[in-house]
Image: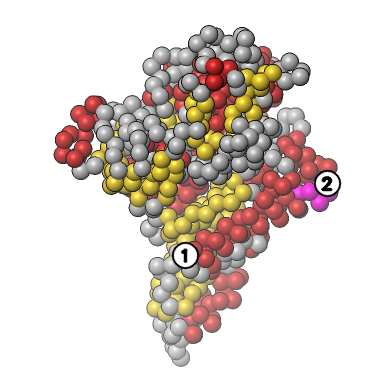
Amino acid sequence: MEKEVKVIFEPSGRTVHVLPGTIMLEAAARAGFIIHSPCGGAGKCGKCQVRVQAGKCAPNAPEAAALGEVRVAEGWRMACQARITGPITVEIPDTSLFQAQQQILTQDAGGELHLQPRVRKQYVQLPIPGQHDAGTDLDRLRAAVGPFQASLPAVRELPGALRSANFKVTAVLVDDELIGVEPGDTMAACFGIAFDIGSTTLVGTLVNLATGVDIAVAARVNPQTSFGDDVVSRIQKCRTDPKGLAQLQTAVLDGVNKIVDELLRKTSLDRSRVYEIVFAGNTTMQEILCGIDPSALGELPFVPAFREALECHAADLHLHVNPQAKVYVFPQIGGFVGGDTVAGIVATRLDRSSAPSLLVDIGTNGEIVLFANGTLWATSVAAGPAFEGARIANGMRAAAGAIEKILLDGDVRINVIGNVKPAGLCGTGLIDVAAEMLRMGILDITGRIQSAAEVPDTISAALKARLVEAENGEVNFLLVSGAESATKEPLYLYQRDLRELQLANGAIRAGINILLRTAGLQASDLGSVLLAGAFGNFIRRNHARRIGMLPPIPCSRIRFVGNTASFGAKRALLSTEEKNYAARLVDAVRHVDLSLDPEFQMEFGSAMILPDHELDGCGED
Ligand code: FES
């Protein structure tokens, strides 16, 4: 195995180990940083600049020309061009981060955002009641802050708060409702949490509502995974087990509350100062979160219980924040196209693209949205858990010990997360090895692994030795020997693993093809393909394209856009106008229900066949 090199990203100090030759953009993604790359890594926009603080990293010719002698001497490099050759420390300035771009709200990262949270705090000094001024406490407060509806809990707090603080209090209003009265001036403490509730992972971002700045982020595995990998198994549980819904709701709320506790612990903030929580998730997740039975999503024609945004108080869901805090659950489109997809459109402004654009969120459920000629179409496909490493014999999630990158030349070169001995293969490694085997002729277009006798003569003896014939006549590919693996067992890529990959791959591509056809477009008409989601951001574009998951367009048109469900949820948290935008999108999007599409099975069948050639001009990722 080739030795990996250490890369430290500053100012966070986050460290990853990558193979020599890895592009800086990819190493940063590995460390969880999505670098802004509007030109798709073509070296043209100059937005991906990073600064080498220690270690060597020679610029290539276009990079040197674009940056100029002085900046090169200062250590500046373009992350999409720079290759890591040895241990290195690299600073990523805020201006180069996609997420930071979202926070500072530039035009191209998601449009202008006017900070307009629905939560408003106002510090007031009220006149003390006297003989000639015996109006009620509420009247006194209204005279100072304007008209509002008062919630009962707020009225309960009011007399005590006024008298304990000499009538100097902070009123907390959500839209036109008074939800609390706090003694003294608490204007500076005004927070909200944006949640992406995925089938596999929950992510919460604590945000300062007064400034729009992120305070902390926390993530954890969705505890519902113990009831099944995908939404179908969870719907099934609700359909067959009378206690199923309650158990699943408790599990997800428990995960959410653990994240809330972690965010508040990290920041030493008072939970009573969190006044709004926004949730974005797929339809099944959103319904279960709210305690709505999703059974109807388990039968044709897959009908969700609601479309518009849902609202309630934190106390209704037993959330560990201010009990009067508002909860906003994203509006959803239809079938399995839920609030996370709406949040994705909000985050990317897909509907404002100048050319036909595709947003693809690849997960157990793949969501695909196409914008063309002023219209949005959305669909979802069941890709299955292959990309999460499930149903793959030696598969695992993208955690320490997972092979996340594979290159084939004379032999197998792998990159393992955490720089430890390999224990299994995650989704990106699976795509890599399939693409590489296809490129070299070890895999044919039907997805069959060739035997050593069948592969082209150009294949090295070392690679041929890895093609091991099983008793059933199938050929399996030895990735890592028992001596080199963490488990001491050899790690194989089995023929049946490739079938699982073909199913997932075929479903996504069939979904893309049907949307394109619905819009009357060819793949070549696409101006951009935006890859979203935790998994999407680690895919190597040339390999995803090589196996046919993505359409044959130049890699420069394929861009990573990060966790758009989180970004969209944060936008909605920070601005009422963004919530209104989400509501308008739900009315505008045309839902393409593939379960009702007679062409889907045919399209799926042909998308299972792997492409027989590589498109020119993609370049290496
Ligand atoms: S120059 Fe555009 S992404 Fe690097």
- Residue 6, horizontal then vertical, whole percent: 40, 44
- Residue 230, horizontal then vertical, whole percent: 69, 38
How far separated are the C-alphas under marks 2 and 1? 40 Å
The circle on residue 267 is 1
Taking 390 as reference, is 611 left or right?
left
Q: Is residue 243 magenta?
A: yes
Looking at marks 2 and 1 on the same chain, the residue that comes earlier in the sequence is marked by 2
* Circle 1: residue type: Thr
Helix, strand, or loop for circle 2?
A: loop
Where's ligand 1: which quadrant? top left
- Residue at position x 38%, y 17% in the image: 617
Taking 458 as reference, is 112 left or right?
left
- Residue 36, horizontal then vertical, whole percent: 36, 38
- Residue at position x 56%, y 76% in the image: 157
User: Dot 2 corresponds to which residue?
Assistant: 241
Helix, strand, or loop for circle 1?
A: helix
The circle on residue 168 is none
Of residues 581 and 489, the one drawn nearer to the viewer in this rendering: 489
Of residues 288 and 403, the one drawn nearer to the viewer in this rendering: 403
| Residue lying farthest to the bottom in this orientation | 131
Prevailing secondary structure class for the magenta stretch in the rendered image: loop
> What range of the chain is rendered magenta?
241-245
Q: Is residue 523 above or below residue 393?
A: above
